[in-house]
């Protein structure tokens, strides 16, 4: 498997071990990603998958140790518990949501609508664009979705950013296949794992070109953020040379070869979850490259929460730490996109 396919398969193993999906559904999804039942069985056996949900945490590919390098230990910040102040902009809700909506599309502070984003190969990417309602030119931020695609929660994230004074866009990286509106979870991950990382980075660049072409966007002030798979793609975009001033990957796995990050000019805030040991294992490698780049960066570990703690539609949602991480993100963008 390539590194995206492995990450997606590991996500499903974690969901199974947390009791979120059945063994049958786990096998179905991993088979779609690997291409055969034999390969899926071999992968799951290597992961130490138990016979029922709630089994002990897997070993091997899906359970990596926490970073122990001296470099990582020197800069990782453990954020204290407590509710973050909301300020004048929207923050994650105090309770989980069922529809992913915390800022309505008709909120009087913003304007938001579906967008068609032209890709370099002529394709039309399925997008969603939000901005403050008041006239002006705003910093632009690209939001990269989780492994589920451009769902309502990600659209809502763009609207939250708009309430904070940013123009924010999200696109579905499987737009050519119909995106999240057409593909169910297993099929979506199968197709996502078959896309080459450089091709997805090209779509990221095309989306930034789209943002810069908007009259209300200050093209010299661009940033990006992403969640889970999207956090990983944020790292991949930096690794591939996408030119932005600031980036905030949320619990994103680092590239297998992150050497390109040593050339980035972006200030980086890496958001991690204390219990997310699999993703956290790449922190040391990311820090090593950021040090080589000589850029401003922070790697923050939020205590008591697991992977995907920011997603208020999911079972791992942690309201206090989600709000704190969001405030940290917005303030980081305000500082570095000023």
Image: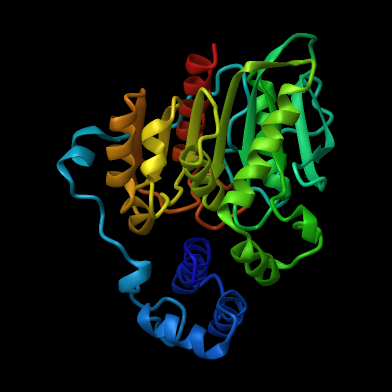
Residue drawn 53% across the image and 83% down it:
23
Q: Position of residue 267 (x, y in %)?
A: 43, 25
Number of marks drawn: 0
Q: Quadrant of residue 59?
A: bottom left
Location of the C terminus by quadrant is top right
Q: Quadrant of residue 277?
A: bottom left
Q: Position of residue 73 (x, y in %)?
A: 19, 40
Front-most of residues 315 and 189: 189
**Farthest front residue in view:** 121
Front-most of residues 47 and 21: 47
**Farthest left residue in view:** 70
Q: Relative to 136, is 189 above or below? A: below
Q: Is residue 11 left or right of residue 33?
A: left
Q: Relative to 19, is 133 above or below? A: above
Q: Relative to 243, is 122 above or below? A: below
Front-most of residues 197 and 164: 197
Residue 94 in view, yes or no: yes
Q: Relative to 171, is 111 above or below? A: above
Residue drawn 15% across the image and 41% down it:
70
Q: Position of residue 106 (x, y in %)?
A: 84, 29
Residue 82 in view, yes or no: no
Q: Is residue 177 left or right of residue 256?
A: right
Q: Is residue 168 left or right of residue 264?
A: right
Coloration mode: rainbow
Residue drawn 52% across the image and 61% down it:
4
């Amino acid at each position: 498997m390539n590194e995206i396919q492995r990450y997606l398969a590991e996500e499903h193993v974690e969901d199974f071990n947390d009791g979120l999906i059945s063994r049958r559904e786990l096998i179905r999804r991993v088979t779609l990603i690997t291409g055969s039942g034999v390969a899926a069985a071999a992968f799951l056996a290597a992961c130490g998958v138990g016979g029922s949900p709630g089994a002990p945490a897997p070993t091997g590919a899906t359970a990596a140790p926490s970073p122990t390098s001296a470099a990582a230990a020197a800069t990782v910040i453990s954020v204290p518990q407590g509710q973050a102040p909301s300020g004048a902009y929207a923050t994650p809700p105090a309770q989980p949501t069922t529809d992913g909506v915390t800022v309505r599309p008709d909120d009087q502070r913003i304007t938001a609508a579906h967008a068609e984003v032209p890709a370099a190969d002529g394709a039309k990417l399925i997008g969603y664009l939000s901005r403050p309602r008041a006239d002006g030119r705003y910093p632009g931020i690209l939001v990269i979705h989780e492994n589920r695609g451009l769902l309502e929660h990600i659209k809502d994230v763009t609207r939250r950013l708009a309430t904070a004074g940013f123009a924010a866009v999200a696109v579905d990286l499987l737009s050519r296949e119909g995106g999240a509106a057409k593909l169910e979870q297993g099929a979506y991950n199968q197709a996502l794992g078959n896309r080459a990382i450089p091709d997805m980075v090209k779509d990221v660049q095309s989306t930034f070109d789209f943002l810069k072409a908007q009259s209300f966007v200050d093209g010299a002030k661009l940033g990006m953020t992403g969640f889970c798979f999207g956090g990983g793609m944020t790292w991949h975009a930096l690794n591939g040379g996408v030119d932005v001033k600031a980036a905030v990957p949320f619990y994103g796995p680092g590239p297998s070869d992150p050497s390109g990050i040593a050339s980035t000019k972006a200030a980086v805030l890496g958001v991690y979850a204390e219990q997310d040991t699999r993703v956290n294992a790449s922190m040391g490698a990311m820090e090593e490259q950021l040090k080589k780049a000589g850029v401003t960066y922070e790697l923050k570990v939020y205590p008591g929460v697991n992977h995907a703690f920011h997603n208020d539609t999911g079972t791992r949602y942690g309201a206090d730490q989600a709000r704190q991480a969001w405030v940290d993100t917005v303030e980081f963008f305000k500082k570095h996109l000023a």
